[in-house]
Image (cartoon, helix red, strand yellow):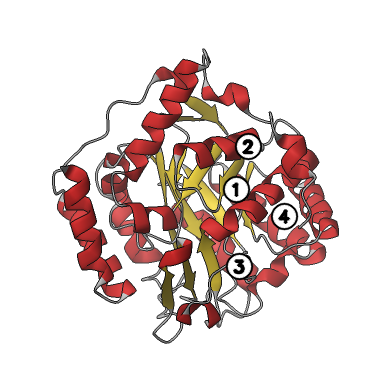
Amino acid sequence: MSGVFEKFGRDLLFALDPETAHGISIAALKSGVPLLCPPGKASHRLRTRVAGIDFPNPLGMAAGYDKNAEAPDGLLRLGFGFAEVGTVTPLPQPGNPRPRIFRLPRDGAVINRLGFNNEGHEKAFARLSRGRRRGVIGVNIGANKDSADRVADYELGVRRFAGVASYLTVNISSPNTPGLRNLQGREMLAELLSRVMAARDASSKVPVFLKIAPDLEEAELDDIAAELLDKSVDGLIVSNTTIGRPAIHDDPGAVESGGLSGCPLFGRSTAMLAKMRRRVGSDMPVVGVGGVNSAETALEKIRAGADLVQLYTGLIYAGPSLPGRIVGGMDRFAASEGLKNVREIRDSRLAHWADQPI
């Protein structure tokens, strides 16, 4: 019965423009509406410790959904093991002109060119500072579009949120802020990571992750991995949306500019994940994102080298029961295979994915 109600709710939301529908979903999570089918308690087989943090399960909500830290507790109630809020910039900014989100239902995909629209550091900080955190909440930090010193914006983000975040993500991979991805180049990345890690060390010991784009060449991956290791960054998230258009249907929205997320991103982002795992070694925490919409796709990210997995677009199409279904499916798989922990399958298909062309 819950599936019927969920489909009905999705159909109603899909009758609205994407940003209106998104606002309604955030309001529902904030309200604490009881779930029709609340997820069960996570099994010990899914618990994992990554970057010094204890995660009840390895599935997280990716940044981009809860940009202003309005509903992280609601997301955790859906069954996610962690939630990442943001991207948050020092000053509020409206982002790019509307329309700027386009659904591609036949592909289970979305194109967005939002441009870091958010209410700024102060409002997000105030929300995260209220009360006691109920779980693992990361904060994804970015730079204002018109900033004179974008690296300084990331330093401000580290200092502002170090005391209220379980971990911080330095997002230099959005395609919707002109010039932002240039920070992935080695010289600029070296300066960014040096300053960010110095700001972190002066504030706290909160783990810092770097989030990269899927639209990189092999030589660029070499440079990024070298800087991550040299600067002792705590972890890596692979990947953000793609400016490519891999294997999507001829849909009116497909011609729109922006970053593509969802099912078509799975292959490229998973290959990128494995290639980076090879480069950074076995110890660095790696989070796999892109095209996760089932227990099997989540498990495949782990086989390709991920310690943790995130999703966003899959929730748009599958509804709020998806996290519980994925976590349950992962646990059943671990039990059927006699695994003490699902992490035992990590890297089991690393060679397959790392050898895929990008």
Residue type, label 2: Pro
Query: Which dot, 1 or 3, sits closer to the camera?
Result: 1
Left or right position of 217 against 122: right
Residue at coordinates 58% horizontally, 38% vertically from top-left? 300
Labels 2 & 4 near each other (Cβ < 8 A): no
Measured as percent of width and height from the top left, residue 152 is found at: 61, 67
Residue type, label 3: Ala
Residue type, label 4: Ser
Query: Which dot, 4 or 1, sits closer to the camera?
Result: 1
Label 1 element class: strand
First reached walking from the N terminus: tag 2 or tag 1: 1
Q: Badge 2: few (under 14), some or many (20 or more) residues near its Cα, within 10 Å?
A: many
Residue type, label 1: Phe
Label 2 element class: loop
Residue 152 circle label: 3
Which residue carries the number 2 mark?
285
Residue closest to the eye, 64 or 87: 64
Residue 321, relative to residue 344: is it above or below?
below
Which residue carries the number 4 mark?
194
Which residue carries the number 1 mark?
209
Residue at coordinates 70% horizontally, 67% vertically from top-left? 183
